[in-house]
Structures are given as C-alpha cells and as structure tokens.
C-alpha cells in the first residue's frame, strides 16, 4: 500500500486527529495570549516583576516537554484529564515568546511619542490602547506566530499522555515501525505549522497599522 | 496664569536640577525659557503639565496648584509641542490632530471641521494632508501638524519645547513667522523653551534666562538687549558676532556661544 493509499484509507482518523490537534493548539494559544499579553503589559509597568515573570516563563521553556507533561500529572484538577493537562503544558510553553514580545514591543515605542501622548492628556489606559498596543502589535503578533509554530510541534508529544492529536499517529508509527503511520501524523502537523505561520504572518502585514516610520 | 513658587527639583535628592525658581507667566504672553542644554528649561516646562512634579515648592496654573488639578484635565487644557513632535506614527494626520477631540467625545462632524480649520491655520491644505501619515511629511510639515494638534481643543495655554529646533534655518524662520502671526490672533499663554537667542528674541514677549538650574532674571526684549548681566552678555555677544545674517542662522548660538 502506497503512502497516498494509506492516507486515503485512514482519512477519517487523520481528519479527526487533525481537528483534535487544532483544538489543542488553538485553545492553548488563546490561553497563552490571554495570560501572556497582560503579563507582558504588566512588566512594562512594574519593572520589579520583570525578572520573576520572564524568568519563570523561561524556566518553563527549559523543561523538556515530556517531563513537563509528567510533572503536571499528579496535580489535582489538571491531572484528571489528559487534554486539560496537555493544554496547561502547551500554554506554559507558549507563554515566553508572547510575554517577551509584548514587553519588547511596548518598550520599543518611541519615548517621544509616549511623552507627547501623555502631554496631550491621555490616561494610562488610553495610552496603552491608542498608542502602545497598536504600535507594538507587529512585534506581539510575531511572538504569537513563533509560539504557535512551536506549539503545533510540541502538541504532538502530548499524545504520549493520551491527549490525542496528531502525535497519536507518530507514537503509533514508532511502535509499529511503520513510516506511513508516522507520516500520517507528521505531514498534517507540518502543514498546520506552515499554515499557522503563513496566516499569522499575513495578519501581521495586513492588520498592523502602517507604523514603520 | 502660571506661577512657580520656590520650586526646586532634585531627582536624586542631592544635585538640584532646579533651585528656588520663582516665575510667573501672564495671560496672553509668550514667555521664553532660554538657557543652555541641561540648565533645567525642559524640566521647568514639564512641571506645568505635571509630567514632572517639583521636589519642593509649588506650581500654580490658573491660581490652583497643579497637584490639585486632575492631571488629565490639566493636560487637556494645555497644548504641548515638543521638538520630536511625537505624532502617532500609526494614525493619519487627521486622526492625530483629532485625537483629543475624539477622546473628549466631540461629534465626528465637529472634529472633522476642527481638523480642517486647524490645518488651514497652520498653512497646510486639508485635502492634501488629511489622509497622510506622519512619515510622509517633511520635518516642517510635521512640526506644523504638531502645533495644530496642540491647538485642537483650543487650550488657553501652550507649552513648546524647542518646537522648531530640528528644522533647517529657512524653514525655521518661516515657521517662526507663521507662529507669530498665529499668536497675534489667538493670544494664547505660551511658555516656549529654546537655547537659541535669536529665536528667543523673535518669538518671546518676555525672556526668562536660566543658567545651571537658577533663574538669572526675566527680561523684556529691550531689557534683555540693554542688560549688563554677564550671562545675558554672553548671549548677546553671540548675537553680535553672528551679525545681521544671524536672523536665519543661529541654530547653535545658545550652546556654543555662552563660553565667549
């Protein structure tokens, strides 16, 4: 049976696992953005929190992913379900690029622009919303883009703890020593990573207000 | 209108950037803060719109200490123009100028009319410039937009921090002239920071001379030209050395000349 025939024969499962994978990645990224962007903003306001927060996110990233899944397993609520656990771990991995780029993006705003905006009488929130976030958007999106591509890859390992996704094929293929099965997981994952990269790159070019001056 | 009472500023607690400053600015006048780089002029200016708070003493705007003002309300009643202009690079000229009116909740039509009026006021054609971005403008045009933005909500007070310092001499002379004509009509209370003696004499109705965080004195134009104070004379000697051609060519006069 050729690779194509194998793919065709198993299209239903490939599709299911791809959707599962999408869900794992999508949900983790939503959480990572929802947590990471505010944290990134926070450390532009409170310099004392800069080191602990960036350091913490850094430490999470240095833990080998398989080990991180293992560490989280005994936790009460998280460990109860594999997908919960996988999403928590994936979110943790995605945090660093999101936090760091939010921080870098906002700190990169021209101080003259910030000062003028404050002088005009913008409140802190207006400054953030009308000036800092729009000007930092390109850098923040770049961080989300990197984080998403990493997460698509790391999410395949989550199958080791039974959370589903395209990693299922990869682990199964490894056990069966069947490259076609491995590729049934690896190819859709690669396509997904490329697609995410392309879409977020496109968003970066089209949604970011023309800020390059 | 604006008053400094025994104002000191020493950010690190020892070396004072400003010491014991007493100064008042009357309604409708253009007070120039003249001095070399680092003498505390910009610090003085920023105390008026509370970008900096004094360590000692108090600053009063319209008879009330700035500390009693809501800082946002205070700043919205004070136009602010800086050398780097500080236009928001992601917004069109129209939205830059209309920023404060929009935040203040003006109806869109009124904001639009105000923006057009202001663009004409600073000699920029609304049809040409409204939809452009700051990076598409020349330095002089950007600076005009900066002035228009500061005037947007028609504030009684205008703070200008070396607003024309980055412009080439010819453009600067043009804009200074326009600025004077504009001020004749609008009669704002203006505090204008410069290190350029020529600019000080051109735009100012009164000159406050600062040196190393101390106020040397305040002078009308005539008083300044006839003063015997050594610091004033240092500036005047620059002016005389430059001769009649100084009109358009005194960019570095304030900084270079004070040693002579």
Image (cartoon, rainbow, N blue to C red):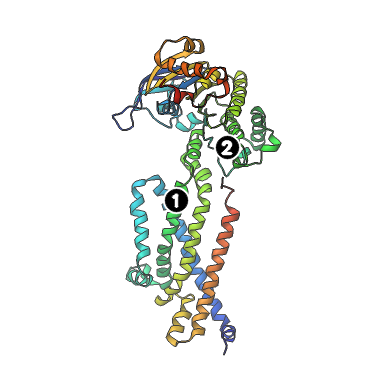
- Callout 1 secondary element: helix
Read off the residue under disc 2: B99
Read off the residue under disc 1: A104
Q: Real-space Cα distance between discs 1 and 2?
A: 25 Å
Q: Which residue is located at x 44 percent, y 81 percent?
A: A171
**Front one among A89 and A154:** A154
Residue B25 visible from this viewpoint? no
Labelled pair 1, 2 in contact (Cβ < 8 Å): no
**Front one among A191 and A31:** A191
Residue A162 lies left or right of residue B95; in this view the side is left
Residue A106 visible from this viewpoint? yes
On the image, the x and y values in percent for residue B232 come to: 43, 15
Quadrant location of residue A160? bottom left
Q: Which mark is residue B169?
A: none
- Callout 2 secondary element: helix
On the image, the x and y values in percent for residue B217 come to: 41, 15
Q: Which residue is located at x 34 percent, y 52 percent?
A: A51
């Amino acid at each position: 049976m050729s690779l194509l025939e194998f793919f065709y024969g198993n299209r239903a499962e490939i599709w299911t696992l791809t959707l599962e994978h999408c869900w794992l990645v999508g949900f983790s990224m939503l959480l990572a953005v929802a947590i990471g962007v505010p944290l990134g903003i926070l450390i532009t306001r409170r310099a004392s929190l800069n080191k602990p927060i960036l350091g913490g996110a850094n430490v999470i990233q240095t833990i080998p992913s398989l080990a991180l899944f293992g560490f989280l397993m005994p936790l009460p609520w998280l460990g109860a379900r594999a997908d919960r656990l996988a999403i928590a771990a994936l979110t943790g991995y995605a945090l660093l690029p999101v936090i760091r780029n939010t921080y870098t993006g906002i700190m990169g705003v021209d101080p003259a622009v910030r000062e003028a905006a404050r002088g005009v009488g913008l409140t802190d929130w207006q400054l953030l919303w009308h000036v800092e976030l729009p000007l930092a958007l390109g850098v923040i999106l770049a961080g989300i883009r990197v984080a998403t591509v990493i997460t698509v890859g790391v999410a395949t390992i989550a199958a080791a703890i039974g959370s589903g996704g395209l990693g299922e094929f990869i682990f199964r293929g490894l056990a069966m020593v069947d490259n076609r099965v491995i590729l049934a997981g690896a190819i859709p994952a690669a396509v997904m990573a490329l697609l995410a990269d392309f879409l977020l790159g496109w968003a970066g070019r089209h949604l970011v207000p023309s800020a390059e001056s | 209108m604006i008053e400094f009472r025994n104002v000191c500023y020493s950010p690190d607690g020892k070396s004072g950037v400003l010491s014991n400053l007493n100064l008042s600015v009357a309604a409708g006048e253009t007070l120039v803060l003249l001095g070399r780089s680092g003498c505390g002029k910009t610090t003085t200016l920023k105390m008026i719109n509370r970008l900096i708070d004094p360590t000692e003493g108090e600053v009063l705007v319209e008879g009330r200490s700035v500390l009693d003002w809501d800082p946002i309300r205070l700043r919205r009643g004070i136009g602010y123009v800086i050398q780097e202009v500080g236009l928001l690079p992601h917004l069109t000229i129209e939205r830059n100028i209309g920023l404060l009116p929009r935040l203040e909740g003006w109806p869109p039509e009124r904001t639009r009319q105000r923006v057009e009026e202001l663009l004409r006021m600073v000699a920029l054609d609304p049809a040409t410039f409204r939809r452009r971005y700051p990076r598409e403008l020349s330095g002089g045009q950007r600076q005009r937009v900066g002035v228009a933005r500061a005037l947007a909500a028609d504030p009684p007070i205008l703070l200008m921090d070396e607003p024309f310092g980055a412009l080439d001499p010819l453009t600067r002379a043009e804009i200074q002239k326009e600025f004077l004509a504009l001020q004749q009509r609008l009669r704002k209370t203006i505090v204008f920071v410069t290190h350029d003696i020529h600019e000080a004499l051109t735009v100012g109705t009164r000159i406050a001379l600062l040196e190393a965080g101390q106020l040397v004195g305040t002078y009308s134009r005539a008083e300044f030209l006839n003063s015997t104070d050594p610091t004033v004379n240092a500036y005047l000697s620059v002016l005389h050395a430059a001769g009649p051609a100084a009109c358009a060519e005194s960019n570095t006069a304030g900084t270079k000349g004070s040693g002579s």
